[in-house]
Amino acid sequence: MLKFLFCLLISPLAWAQVSLFNTKGQQPDICLDKSGKIELVFGQKNKLFYSFSLDQGKHFSEPSLVDSLVGLHLGASRGPRIASSNKLTIITAVDKSGNIYAFRKSGNNVWVKNRVNDIPEIAKEGFNAIAANEKHQFSVIWLDLRNNQKNKLMSSTSVDGGKTWQKNQLVYASPESSICECCQPNIMMKDGHIAIMFRNWLQGARDMYVIQSQDGGKSFGQAQKLGMGTWVLNACPMDGGSLDIAPNGEIVSVWRRAENLYTSGIQGEEKLVGPGKNASTVMLSSGQWITWSHMGQIFLKSNKTDDPKSLGNGKFPIMKAINAQQAYIVWENQGQIFGQVL
């Protein structure tokens, strides 16, 4: 039975929390198009499910099966990703053999699968991200072990709506050894401007970097470290942060260092948000908004306010803008998928 989500603000500090579906799921991701359609993907064991909302998240369709993928990577920010070019939608997922697959809808509404990586079984860590622009260009990034068994950042582009994927391109390789091997990279695209955020590993430090392209991913500039501080850590924090491209083209970001979250642009000092992890951010007309998890709860705040609001129990929140004024947040809690309009 279709389950409805009524996204109503109860009070200034309390929010309604109702699961979106009876179906259990993990690692939800969302994308939005200009019409306001919200598209959602999540994983369940070895299966991928898709759902959508035409009324800004008040009601979602019954989840439909996209495909089964033996050994689907799920958990700890690993999971399926989704992006829309307003007319076309692509879902990506990684199996435990290390292959990245893209699923696109054919004319008869059947999801068609093809492989993105041009060398098989090189994405063993299971992290990937996808973005699209309005010209139906899609770009996928992932952690890749080719040539030297060291994780590096690779990408591939499709200019035909996911029917074919171009030769894989090296975006960044650490001059020392590997980039951080178990943190989710993220990608945003606006026209030909691509911004990619990843956790590096240089001189023992696990700091966040952004690397950008101004020509649709044909070439990339120098990777730039975020913030003035550093995090020397002989372990992987399992936390990749989030970024957005503001209307003026500037980058806003949120990321974790030690037990705290920070916001920053590409240059300058970082600003403390507070304790937390697995943050997501969007830039709206009201400013930068951040959502994250801390001690089993989902929190939300603007960069213009001091006090965060609790959205309820959960982890791994993802937030995307619906329009200039609103965003939608989705997360998981004990095997159920939850959502909320901001």
Image (cartoon, rainbow, N blue to C red):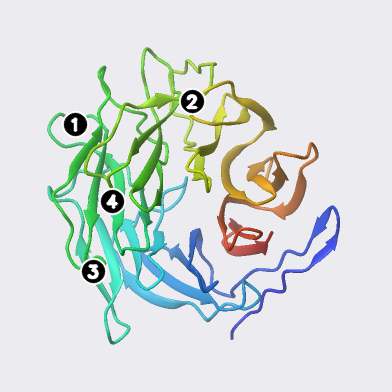
In the current view of this chain or complex, which residue is farthest to the right? 11
Camera-nearest residue between 281 and 43: 281
Q: Position of residue 72 (x, y in %)?
A: 33, 58
Q: Position of residue 187 (x, y in %)?
A: 40, 46
Instruction: Say which residue label 4 marks.
Output: 96
CB under 8 Å between callouts 3 and 4?
A: no
* Label at residue 149: 1
Amino acid type, label 1? Gln
Task: Describe the element under mark 1 as helix, strand or loop.
Answer: loop
Q: Residues within 10 Å of mark 4 (few under 14, many from 20)?
A: some
Amino acid type, label 2? Leu
* Label at residue 113: 3
Alpha carbon distance from label 1 to label 3? 27 Å
Alpha carbon distance from label 2 to label 1? 27 Å
Alpha carbon distance from label 3 to label 4? 17 Å
Q: In which quarter of the image is residue 195?
A: top left
Camera-nearest residue between 212 and 5: 212
| Sooner in the amino-acid sequence: mark 3 or mark 2 | 3
Q: Position of residue 250 (x, y in %)?
A: 50, 38
